[in-house]
Image (cartoon, helix red, strand yellow):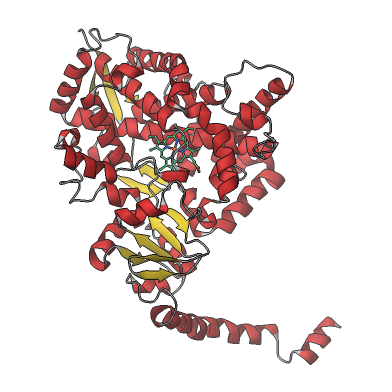
Amino acid sequence: MIANFTSEVLPGSFSQYFSILVPSYFLIYLPTRFIYRLYFDALSGIPGPKPRLFSDLLTRVYNLATGRSGLLIFRLREWHDQYGPIVRLSSNEVHINDIDTYNQIFKVATNYPKTKFYYSSPSTKHSLLDLRDFHAVHLRRSALQPYFSKGSVRKLEGLIQTKIDQFLDRLSESKDVINISRGFRCLTCDVITTYSYEKCFEALSHPTFSPDWLVALEDLISTAQLTVALPGLTITMQWIFQNIIGRERAKKISPNVANAMEFEEHCRIAVLKQQERWNAGERNLVTIFEQLFQGDEKKGRKAATKDELAGEALLTVAAGMDTTGHTLTVATYNLVKYPEIQEKLLKELMTVMPHPKSEIKEEILDRLPFLQACLKESLRFSHGVSNPLARDVPPTGANILGYDLPPGTITMNSHYIYHTNSTVFPDPLRWNPGRWSGPDEKVKQMDNYFMPFSRGARICIGLNLAWAEMLLTLARLVRRFEITYSEDFADSNMEWVSMFVPVTKGMLTVNVKERKE
Ligand code: HEM
């Protein structure tokens, strides 16, 4: 009956329609739209690589399939050299290389919200990362920020020091080659989980610093690019794994996915248990979520939902572990590579740490200029979030670098591009902490181009914690140990691609020996 109906109303079979529609789409619709984008739409005057305008989806899928997604960041430099400070990347996206524009977009009172498309990961849904509304962001951040102030971090310094003790003792006991890339991540994970919700994940206790979930997260990080290319696909896959397949069966299909699910579940359980204790009247918890457990009527903030707490619990670990760990890896790799720089740092450390195992406070290290310079240079090289940061042009539209951009145009800025500007940082790919002790004017200019934690309303919430962890770890590591690369380590291990965060080709593997004095 239905067949009769369709053949009467719509003469011809489905395959006939299909054989007309598909070629029309590729031979007429796409080329016409391409010409429109090239010559007539609102962004048509902005220079850039033209083939990318043919189809955003096909470009993303092509880049993903050919492994170019993670290398886009390096092409951006070439495109800016060729086309100038603003480059059109797709139908609706421009990439910018202009520090004044960056400072406008990333200011405290910004009206450029985060671009939903690039920040919607199912795992961090309901978390701060996913919020775009400025008032909602302000409320959430003001509930979390007090726990990350310099004063709060100093109060919990004992906790950080205890984890560093454990880490250094583990290095000392090790008879084998040490995968210190993972070691640093275990350290930062144990710090952030204890600091955030008292539930230390005990990653440092793993004999080779390789707990299953850490290795799983390492393997799954490449799905960050899949999420960018085909967001719907990852959301659907995650939903299927969570709601249909379940963790037990997932173990057989993909142990990595099962381990990552288990990790998420650990974070969720940890924070919800704290909430229960808080609701039962316990008030002496070490937690960054206390203000989220309760609402604040005066400010118009409701108590966080269970999903919001779980999202936040996962976000703090995800945001605080790899970033800090990777910067420490970059610092260590380069200090071993340049022994004369390591020697200079060691001499400075000896002025405040007379013995290899001397105790030291962060506030003292905060005053050591060469240690600061080594860390700044490592942050310049490690690029925290290495993918371009995407922000939408506000409803009023914007004029950027002489071009009128309509509301909703996506602006992209990459810290990598600013951090490797060869006019500001001569010989930019050389790790050279000495550059930070140049003349004041020069350092001021470098500081203007240095934004590892981003800037403005969405600046990294954990920067004081990260800074304290990095100062203490690096100082105590270098003061206590002579470090050498392991025999099978190659410089190429440190080559990286961008998967939202930088992912190195291999690991930094080292041998360590206790210093005698
Ligand atoms: C070297 C270490 C770190 C670097 C380089 C770094 C870098 C960054 C950057 C660039 C952003 C902005 C991302 C964007 O707008 O897309 C960010 C956001 C964030 N970071 Fe960090 N981060 C570090 C450590 C930490 C730590 C230890 C925490 C611990 C809680 C943390 C928590 C966060 C959070 C929650 C956000 C999201 C803020 C928001 O969306 O408003 N980060 N970080």
* In the depicted structure, whether residue 300 falls above or below residue 195: below
Q: Residue furthest front?
A: 298
Residue at left offset 17%, top offset 41%: 441
The image quarter containing residue 266 is top right
Quarter occupied by the N terminus? bottom right
Total labels: the figure holds 0
Residue at left offset 30%, top offset 53%: 99
Residue 203 horizontal side relative to residue 382, left or right: right
Residue at left offset 27%, top offset 68%: 83
- Pick whichever, 284 or 74, lies toward us: 284
Q: Quadrant of ligand 1?
A: top left
Q: Is residue 121 visible?
A: no
The image quarter containing residue 474 is top left
Q: Is residue 40 visible?
A: yes
Rendering coords of residue 111 (x, y %): 49, 55
Residue at left offset 53%, top offset 57%: 117
- Pick whichever, 86 or 220, lies toward us: 86
Rendering coords of residue 469 (x, y %): 39, 24
* In the depicted structure, whether residue 321 falls above or below residue 107: above
Quarter occupied by the C terminus? top left
* In the depicted structure, whether residue 288 falls above or below residue 21: above
Rendering coords of residue 428 (x, y %): 20, 46
The image quarter containing residue 96 is bottom left
Residue 440 horizontal side relative to residue 75, left or right: left
Rendering coords of residue 312 (x, y %): 58, 36
Residue 49 horizontal side relative to residue 260, left or right: left
